[in-house]
Image (cartoon, rainbow, N blue to C red):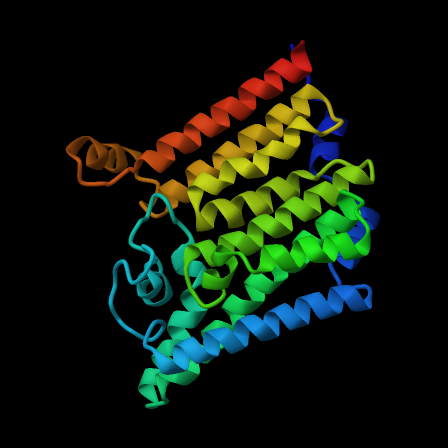
Amino acid sequence: MYNVDSSNVKSIFSINRASAFQVFYSLVPSHLAERCLLFCSWFVYFVLGSYIALSTSIIDTKETNDMYLSFDNSTTLYFGSVEKPTHPLTKFFYLPFSLLHDLFVKYGINEKYFSLIVLLFCSFFVAASVFFCFKYVQNIVKIDIWPALLISVFYSVFGGCIILSFTPETFTFSLFLLSLSVYVVSFILIVNQKPSIWYYIVFGTLIGGQTVTNAPKVAIPLLYEKSSFRQKIVKFIIVVFCISAMILMRYKFDLLSFFMLIWRGQVNIPVQIFLCGIHLFLIFSVAMYLFLR
């Protein structure tokens, strides 16, 4: 009979506290260039967004679909998301904003103030993404501070960053989470550590819950881990489980009804979910090739 090695199970779920604190402190701006980049980009994004919000009705309008560049601001901000399979947890991420908006409406407060609060967070998410880009280029790629700063500033003026800085959409939060996860896992790997299973659970849930098709990106570090193949398989299965659970939780895990709705064409399962499965399969195939050859 096969016996499960309890030490392997514990090692998978264990957390290196020293490494965790090291990662946490690495996320804090440590010198003047990092502080200037973070707060200056945050300030510039917020000023730009404030001008747009106060002079237009981009944020506080109640139009539900395709406001500009195919963004669904009000659908995301006020209603969570209508696409249950692709954005399963977006409604919960934006629930505080929905509740805050209800308070503004209840007490008759000008909704422009609500727009400014939303902009404060949107601009911070994009500014933090620029900051993580700088940290990655400097600490992971090992580029000198001035070229790294130049690359980060160049990245900050991309059209996508500028638009997302005043756009309360799933892309804004996804940009922040993906930038954070890439830097965190790269930092862990570069100090010769291996990501805990909790990294895959937490970031897999947050990133996949925001946009399901981004969830396979959380599994990519498995290709670079210095751990046993069995542990890689366990972590991969957990990522797949998190994705499946997030999709099905919006349907109360009623598998029969869920698949019947798909069969009848009443649930729109877009091509993105199929591509998500393809991505996971490709990552798994590459992992099998690298670690079994």
Examine the rendered structure and indicate whether residue 4 appears above or below residue 59.
above
- Between 68 and 106, the residue placed more toward the observer is 68
| Residue 2 makes an appearance in the image | no
User: Is residue 135 rendered to the left or right of residue 207?
Assistant: right
Q: Quadrant of the N terminus?
A: top right
Identity of the residue drawn at 25% across and 59% down: 65
Number of dots carrying numbers: 0
Residue 234: x and y, percent? 61, 27
Q: Residue furthest bottom?
A: 108
Q: Give the quadrant of residue 74.
A: bottom left
- Between 137 and 197, the residue placed more toward the observer is 137
| Residue 158 makes an appearance in the image | yes
Q: Quadrant of the C terminus?
A: top right
User: Is residue 29 rendered to the left or right of residue 253?
Assistant: right
User: Is residue 146 rendered to the left or right of residue 54?
Assistant: right
Residue 84: x and y, percent? 32, 48
- Between 276 and 149, the residue placed more toward the observer is 149
Q: Residue furthest left?
A: 264
Residue 42: x and y, percent? 60, 70
Identity of the residue drawn at 70% across and 33% down: 12
User: Is residue 123 rendered to the left or right of residue 232?
Assistant: left
